[in-house]
Image (tube, grey):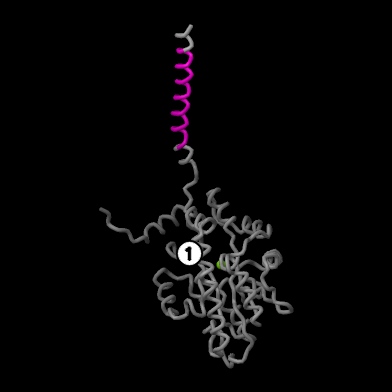
Amino acid sequence: MIARIRARHVSSWSAVVVLVFALALATPSRAQDAPQNDLLNAVLWMQRSVEYKATALTAFALARIRLEQALTDPRWTAAPKEQTGNYQALPPAIVLDVDESIVDNSAYQAWMALRDTTFDPKTWNAYVNTVTSQAIPGAVDFARYADARGVKVFYVSNRTAEEEEATRKNLEKLGFPMGGTVDTMLMTKKQPDWGSAKGSRRAHIAKSYRILLNVGDNFGDFVDEYRGTEAERLKVMEEHKDRWGREWIMISNPAYGSFESAPFNHDFKLSPADRRKAKRAVLDPWSGP
Ligand SMILES: [Mg+2]
């Protein structure tokens, strides 16, 4: 009898051991099945890290200091190309890009990373219409501070004119100042000459305002020469060396932007595999041990 009970125990323990081994073997294969998407670390940093939030707060704290300096210096302008003539006496304004400069769309990025898919205007538009973009830490307080100081806050975004209504609702919901009687939402293609390069929209603002600050997450938020090679982009960035952290404030965005497409010459017709190959090819590695 005892021997039979023991035998039964041994056999049930064997079953447990087999099950544990089976699970141990199954776990790595499940992990391998998860998409190896290049967005993972960038989205993890933006969505979950305190470092990202602290970086954004740092940028907007600096922006507040620069805004005060700019208000007391009538020669100060953040639009060196577009601000011409006697701009010194014009009322003050600031230019804010929207996506990943003042609002956080990391839910869309996370969806792409987990589904292992790429940007598509259709899915992006569906996301925009959910009106669920979150505020980037420090952005609302900074925009409201500028507005309270009598500075007009313009939103120069490459969201389309069709996306303006949802974007306006989203910004309103988050507490951003909406411009009162002035149309401060300058979406791409809203006027025939407003392409994705933003200079023409800055020129439109500069006719009536002195632009004190420009806040963006992409090189193209500051200059129209952003779609060059990496070497060309570096040259333009260095030409404007003294503007960064002064009248131009860059918000971190490791998830997407012209930095990512420069290695494959912004040729989005290339397959994801070929784009990845080009990105790997520009890395500058240590020779190894
Ligand atoms: Mg942006």
Position above or below: 56 against 26: below
Residue 151 coordinates in the image, percent (x, y): 64, 81
- Circle 1 packing at 10 Å, graded few (<14), some (14-19), many (20+), is some
Q: Image check: 183 left or right of 237?
A: right
> For ligand 1, which image quadrant applies?
bottom right
Position above or below: 56 against 40: below
Instruction: Examine the image and state in which quarter residue 129 appears.
Output: bottom right
Label 1 sits on residue: 266
Q: Nearer the viewer, residue 76 or 126?
A: 76
Q: Nearer the viewer, residue 14 or 86?
A: 14
Q: Amino acid at mark 1?
A: His
Position above or below: 88 against 26: below
Position above or below: 193 against 254: below
Residue 31 coordinates in the image, percent (x, y): 47, 41
Residue 289 coordinates in the image, percent (x, y): 25, 53
Task: Check residue 241 for magenta coloring.
Answer: no
Instruction: Examine the image and state in which quarter residue 143 appears.
Output: bottom right
Q: Secondary structure at mark 1?
A: loop
Q: Residue at x 66, y 73 (%)?
A: 185
Q: Residue at x 59, y 60 (%)?
A: 105
Q: How many marks?
A: 1
Q: Nearer the viewer, residue 98 or 123?
A: 98
Q: Image check: 54 left or right of 89?
A: left
Q: Image check: 234 left or right of 34?
A: left
Cβ(mark 1) to ligand 1 < 8 Å?
A: no
Direction right: furthest residue? 181
Task: Check residue 8 for magenta coloring.
Answer: yes
Direction top: furthest residue? 1
Q: Which residues are magenta?
A: 6-27
- Specify the principal SS of the magenta part: helix
Direction front: furthest residue? 2
Residue 106 coordinates in the image, percent (x, y): 57, 58
